[in-house]
Amino acid sequence: MALKVAPSMLASDLARLADEAQRMEQAGADWLHIDIMDGRFVPNITMGIPVVQSLRKHTRLPLDIHLMVQEPERYVERFAEAGGDYIVVHAEATTHLHRTLQQVRATGKKAGVALNPATPLSAIEHVLDELDLLTIMSVNPGFGGQKFIPGALPKVEHAAKLLGPRLGRVELEVDGGVTVQNAPACRSAGASVLVAGTSVFGAPDAREAIAHIRGRA
Ligand code: DX5
Ligand code: ZN
């Protein structure tokens, strides 16, 4: 199964979002990762529903909507309508995770769960059948450009075991501080999608950075 690379648009020039999305598309990105922050679940505020709606018209790539939002169930339908393909909620942010995942699937979109570095994998043990994507955070969410937390690697390995035969149908994503240097370790731990912000947008050649992260130099 080919590894996917999802550039995090948070690291792009946000005033030129459509151009940046097209640049990533041309550079070989598989998905676009969109970081939605509400200033409550995380200290930062980024973009919202109208931005996703506008961006949708400018790219054909799947949009991976990472909701760093308290009570994401309040916004699931609106992000789905705006054009998200994967709607990813944090297990720590929603009381009724099982219901929230069903709510995502009811929109016809793919349902994802993200886990903070301190959150154990047991948080998703009983919702495996409702999952299309699992995101292991390798930084504490809130900001781009942070350092990769090495403890995420054994967690990804455990997650791959927990997903077992589901892996493949369920994507296993690593998000935060992914670089050309640590991407091979993420891949061998079992990741199927790598999110990369700073290491792609900060690179002199985005196409080369994406190819290296994917492991095809
Ligand atoms: C962190 C976000 C990440 C981040 C990735 O809160 O969820 O998606 O923007 O960016 P880098 O690769 O710069 O850590
Ligand atoms: Zn993210």
Image (cartoon, grey):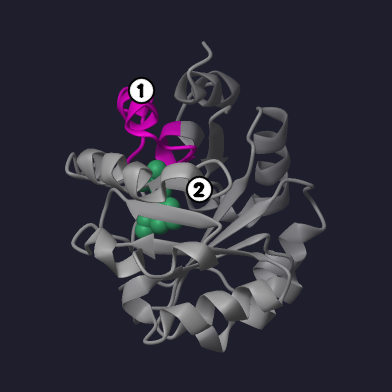
Where is 196 relative to 140, above or below?
above
27 relative to 125 in the view: left or right:
right
Q: Quadrant of the N terminus?
A: top right
Q: CA distance from mark 2 to mark 1?
A: 22 Å
Q: Nearer the viewer, mark 2 or mark 1?
A: 2
- Residue 85 placed where, x, y %? 68, 60
First in residue order: circle 2 vs circle 1? 2
Q: In the current view of this chain or complex, which residue is farthest to the right?
A: 57
- Residue 63 placed where, x, y %? 65, 55
83 relative to 202 in the view: left or right:
right
Identify which amino acid the numbered label 1 is placed on: Pro
Helix, strand or loop at mark 1: helix
Ligand 2 shown in quarter: bottom left
Helix, strand or loop at mark 2: helix
- Please give the range of residues in magenta: 177-199
Can residue 18 be seen at all in this image of the molecule?
A: yes
Query: Does the magenta run of residues contain 157?
Result: no
Determine which residue is flagged by label 1: 184
Per the rendering, the mark at residue 166 is 2
